[in-house]
Amino acid sequence: MERHKLGRAPNYTNACIVMFGVNLAWVLLFLFAIWGLIAAVFLSLAINHWLNWLDFRRRIAEARFAPRQPND
């Protein structure tokens, strides 16, 4: 059992980002084919709003733990 050391896990970040884009593209094309442009635009706006909200939350979390600059 000692000979079977665990190595580092591969980094799948780029693959995840690419597959998110591929899945988003086919979902938007499906919506466009079924319900038209308005449904696809509304879903795109909702996803954009959600991603902006996630970015805002991430920046707040990073600022909370960042070292403070001394006042000059």
Image (tube, rainbow, N blue to C red):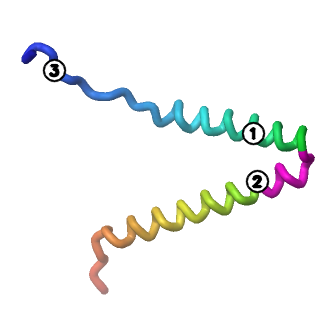
Q: In which quarter of the view is residue 33 placed?
A: top right
Query: Could you tell me if residue 72 is visible in this image?
Result: no
Q: Is residue 55 magenta?
A: no
Q: In this picture, which residue range is highlighted in magenta? A: 35-42
Does residue 4 appear left or right of residue 40 in this picture?
A: left
Which residue is under mark 2? 43
Q: Residue at label 3?
A: 5
Q: Residue furthest left?
A: 2
What amino acid type should be assigned to the residue bearing mark 2?
Answer: Leu
Q: What x and y, as percent, mark residue 44?
A: 75, 53
Q: Is residue 40 above or below residue 52?
A: above
Q: CA distance from mark 2 to mark 1?
A: 10 Å
Mark 1 = which residue?
27
Tell me which amino acid carries mark 3: Lys
Identify which residue is drawn at 70% across, 40% down.
Answer: 24
Residue 17 shown left or right of residue 2 in the figure: right
